[in-house]
Image (cartoon, rainbow, N blue to C red):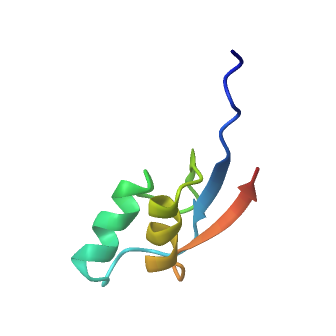
Amino acid sequence: MAKAATKTVTVEQIGSPIRRISEQRQTLIGLKLNKMRRRSTLPDTPEVRGMIAAVKHLVRVVDGQ
C-alpha cells in the first residue's frame, strides 16, 4: 500500500516573545520557533492549528499544502 501524503503547514515567526506571558513563549517553542523570521514546517493537525491560533499575533502561515 502507498503511504498517504500528509498535509503540512509552514509558519514563520513575525513577533518577538519579549514581554509575553510564558504560555505564549512555550507555544512558540512547541512550534519549533524561537527567533524572528524563523520558519518551521509542521504537520497540519488540529493541535498545531490550535497552537497557531494561540499565538496568531506572533506568527503567520506562510504555506499550507
Image height check: is 18 above or below 38? below
User: Residue 4 in the image: x percent, y percent?
Assistant: 69, 31
- The residue sitting at 71% across, 18% down in the picture is 2
| Total numbered labels placed on residues in the image | 0
- The residue sitting at 64% across, 53% down in the picture is 10
Image height check: is 51 above or below 7? below
User: Residue 61 in the image: x percent, y percent?
Assistant: 67, 65
- The residue sitting at 43% across, 50% down in the picture is 32
Q: Quadrant of residue 17?
A: bottom left
Q: Is residue 55 visible?
A: no
* Residue nearest the viewer, comparing 35 with 44: 44
- The residue sitting at 35% across, 57% down in the picture is 29
Image height check: is 18 above or below 8? below
User: Residue 43 in the image: x percent, y percent?
Assistant: 56, 47
Q: Is residue 8 left or right of residue 63?
A: left
Seen from this angle, which residue lies furthest top?
1
User: Residue 62 in the image: x percent, y percent?
Assistant: 72, 61
Q: Is residue 36 visible?
A: yes
Seen from this angle, which residue lies furthest front?
1
Q: Quadrant of the N terminus?
A: top right
Q: Is residue 19 left or right of residue 61?
A: left
* Residue nearest the viewer, comparing 25 with 53: 53
Image height check: is 51 above or below 11? below
* Residue nearest the viewer, comparing 24 with 54: 54
